[in-house]
Image (cartoon, rainbow, N blue to C red):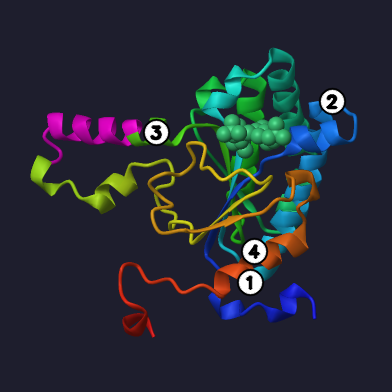
């Protein structure tokens, strides 16, 4: 029986976050340049986006480029930005066909102008869609996002719009880039690294973490289904006892 037949469709996570890691090692293992890995990683993105849509996942948030990734060799950074532009152009028709709404989080002003414009255009074009919300984390740093939220709240207190005593978790959440989205129930990281790398630190407070050795360009729909199955076998206790939960 394939994994998809074992999945309980009533208990599919509403929001799945993915750290797509291992493109460079995948390419190196084939004696190619790192960029070759990024190009092949796009094929995995396409497959996983479709699979998530098929299962009725509402939100898929992909770590595409971190704030720290700006420190990579200039050639690689440029190649990734160009790949982003060409991919947006190539995939837009498919996103429309599959009813996918594109979204982006991060310090988008840091993106090259053309990249930022194409991204905004694609977000605008797909804003009419009602299916999966696909969020790309680009030039993204979770700590930066948290500082940004803190500043927003401070500004509201300073202007008298908000009272200090009224600040609560919900309000903080409403000022994150992910405002309006449910928190991810499942976080997947590929490539055998066991770390979070400054991704959605606030939002994953109670997410189930799933790590796989697979390198991102080898990760396909079956691997997503396997991760969801693993998630469904877990007991989420949120601090309670097992007896309380059952
Ligand atoms: C993830 O793959 C893609 C980005 C971070 C842009 P890597 O490029 O980090 O690949 P490895 O981890 O070096 O193999
Ligand atoms: C995290 O991967 C960022 C993305 C997947 C876009 P990295 O490869 O940059 O993470 P580290 O540096 O190994 O922690
Ligand atoms: Mg990496």
Q: 93 left or right of 182?
A: right
Quadrant hosting ligand 1: top right
Label whose residue precedes the other's in the sequence (2 or 1): 2
Label 2 packing within 10 angstroms: few (<14), some (14-19), many (20+) = some
Nearest to N terminus: mark 4 or mark 2: 2
Residue 13 image-quadrant placement: bottom right
**Separation of disc 2 and disc 1 at Cα?**
34 Å
Q: Position of residue 10 (x, y in %)?
A: 56, 79
Mark pair 4, 2: CA separation: 29 Å
Res. 79 image quadrant? top right
Q: Nearer the viewer, residue 8 or 171?
A: 8
Seen at 35% across and 36% down, the residue is 146
Q: In the rendered structure, which segment of residues is drawn in magenta? A: 147-162
Q: Which residue is mark 4?
A: 227
In the rendered structure, does residue 158 fall within the stretch colored magenta? yes
Most common SS among magenta residues: helix
Mark 3 or mark 2, whichever is nearer to me = 2
Query: Depth-wise, is mark 4 or mark 3 nearer the camera?
Result: 4
User: Closest to the observer: 76 or 126?
Assistant: 76
Residue at numbered disc 2: 33
Q: CA distance from mark 1 to mark 3?
A: 31 Å
Mark nearer the N terminus (1 vs 3): 3
- Which residue was labeled with disc 1? 229
Q: Residues within 10 Å of mark 1 (few under 14, many from 20)?
A: some
**What mark, if any, has residue 145 been given in the picture?**
none
Asked whether 128 falls inside the magenta stretch, the response is no
Crowd tier of the residue under label 3, counting other residues whose Cα lies within 10 Å: few below 14, some 14–19, many 20 or above: some
Q: Residue at x 59, y 60 (%)?
A: 130
Is 122 located above or below residue 80 in the figure? below
Residue designated by label 3: 143
Horizontal side of 165 relative to 244 (left or right) equals left
User: Disc 4 or 3, which lies upstream in sequence?
Assistant: 3
């Amino acid at each position: 029986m394939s994994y998809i037949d074992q999945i309980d469709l009533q208990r599919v996570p509403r929001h799945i976050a993915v750290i797509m890691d291992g493109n460079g090692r995948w390419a190196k293992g084939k004696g190619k340049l790192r960029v070759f890995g990024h190009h092949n990683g796009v094929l995995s993105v396409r497959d996983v986006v479709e699979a998530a849509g098929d299962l009725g996942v509402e939100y898929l948030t992909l770590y595409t480029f971190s704030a720290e990734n700006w420190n990579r060799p200039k050639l690689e950074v440029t190649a990734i930005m160009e790949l982003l532009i060409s991919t947006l152009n190539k995939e837009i028709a498919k996103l429309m066909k599959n009813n996918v709404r594109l979204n982006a989080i991060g310090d988008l002003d840091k993106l090259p102008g053309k990249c930022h414009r194409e991204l905004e255009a694609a977000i605008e074009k797909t804003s009419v869609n009602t299916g999966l919300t696909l969020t790309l984390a680009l030039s993204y740093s979770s700590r930066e996002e948290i500082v940004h939220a803190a500043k927003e709240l401070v500004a509201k207190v300073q202007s008298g719009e908000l009272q200090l005593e009224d600040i609560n978790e919900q309000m903080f959440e409403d000022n994150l880039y992910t405002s309006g989205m449910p928190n991810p129930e499942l976080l997947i990281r590929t490539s055998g690294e066991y770390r979070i790398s400054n991704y959605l630190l606030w939002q994953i407070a109670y997410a189930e973490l799933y790590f796989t050795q697979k390198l991102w360009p080898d990760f396909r729909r079956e691997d997503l289904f396997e991760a969801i199955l693993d998630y469904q076998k877990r007991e989420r206790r949120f601090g309670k006892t097992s007896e309380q939960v059952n």
